[in-house]
Amino acid sequence: MPTIYGLIREMERAAKRAAREQAYEEKKRAKAEAFEVARTAVEQYQYLLSAITTLHKDCCNSIDWSYLSQKEPPKEIPKNNHFEVIAREKKQEYHPSFFVKLFQRTEKQLSDLENEIQQAIEKDNQIHDEQVLDYENRLLRWESDKNLASRIIKGETEAYGEVLSSQLTIKENPFIGERIDFHFSDENPPIFELLVHPIDEIIPTFILKLLINGGLSKREMPKSTRYLLYKEYVCSGVIRLSREVFALLPFETITINAKCNQLNGMTGFMEEVIILSVFIPKGTLDSINLQLIEPSIAIDNFSHNMEFKKLSGFNSVSQITPTILRNKNNPQQLNA
């Protein structure tokens, strides 16, 4: 028979086992929570780097202005008395039963059938009213699209602006930049200006990695890696903008200036300067497999002005001009 002392010792051992198990479970739970926090942080980090360097892979839907200008107007839907016909057939096929006649309920049932006909007429009218409203809305859209298509084909710059202001999906992407401007003239290709985010607002200063043991590694990102990522981001944004412009408007060539706020060492003020100016023909862009390119390398497919150094990044450049284009396309002219 166990003694009181033995029972107390057994209770103490049980309490210690329970405490050890609780401490183990708490440590295990804390480790799992820390791993989840580390995994989420690394996923968000990798998503950011992917998002800012693959901007060029997405694009808005293209618009066929020639098709819209020739598209036939929508057809008005004739009124359909579908439910009224069913209700009237039901009344015509009505034959009162023996008991209905016996209890003199024929008139009541005929009255109910007549009410059903009136309700069916109202339902048909309601459906037709909705169809008329839908037709009027489609007709208005058709007239608006046809008018806008006509203006686009004629080359009205105001129409260009309307389309760009309403249809550019690139503006909805928080990574792309701070502002998009555009300028049109009869002498030169359309010019688009993309104000990109400064490097300190878009490129991390550190590298995050998930360790084998579940821990989180955070170390400083080398300057060269950071500037190269920024170059990828800028070039990717420029290519994305060019894709959307060509999808929305019937241009064959455009010029895009990527601009950034940089400190002017002479004045001490921040200024918007061009860091990349690219002349992009639609045919060249269409010939590239945009899903597999590296943006900073693919930009060499186009005539461009860019001054970039691995350890200092972008310097300001001038906008590419027709004269510069001629010189780049015909290098021998430089010696003329």
Image: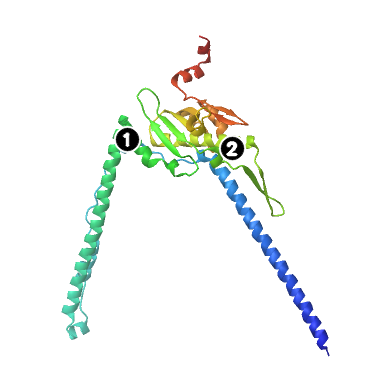
Residue at point 60%, 50% (across, down): 43
Residue at point 66%, 58% (across, down): 34
Is residue 221 shown left or right of residue 260? right
Residue at point 30%, 30% (across, down): 154
Residue bearing the label numbered 1: 159
Nearer to us in this view, 121 or 9: 9
Is residue 185 shown left or right of residue 45? left
Quick one: SS at disc 2? Answer: helix
Q: Work out whether mark 2 precedes mark 1 in sequence or the reverse, and give the earlier one.
A: 1
Which of pointers 2 and 1 indicates the residue nearer the eye?
2
Q: Which mark is residue 174?
A: none
> Could one spot residue 320 in this view of the protein?
yes
Quick one: SS at disc 1? Answer: helix
Kind of residue sitting beneath label 2: Leu
Q: Is residue 123 above or below residue 217?
A: below
Picture quadrant of residue 219: top right
Q: Position of residue 317 (x, y in %)?
A: 51, 26
Is residue 208 shown left or right of residue 307? right
Q: Residue furthest bottom?
A: 1
Picture quadrant of residue 297: top right
Kind of residue sitting beneath label 1: Ala
Is residue 67 shown left or right of residue 125? right
Residue at point 52%, 35% (across, down): 234
- Count residues near mark 1 (Cα–Cα under 10 Å), then give few for <14, some for 14-19, many for 20+: some
Q: CA distance from mark 2 to mark 1?
A: 36 Å
Nearer to us in this view, 298 or 38: 38
Q: Position of residue 169 (x, y in %)?
A: 43, 42
Q: Which mark is residue 229?
A: 2
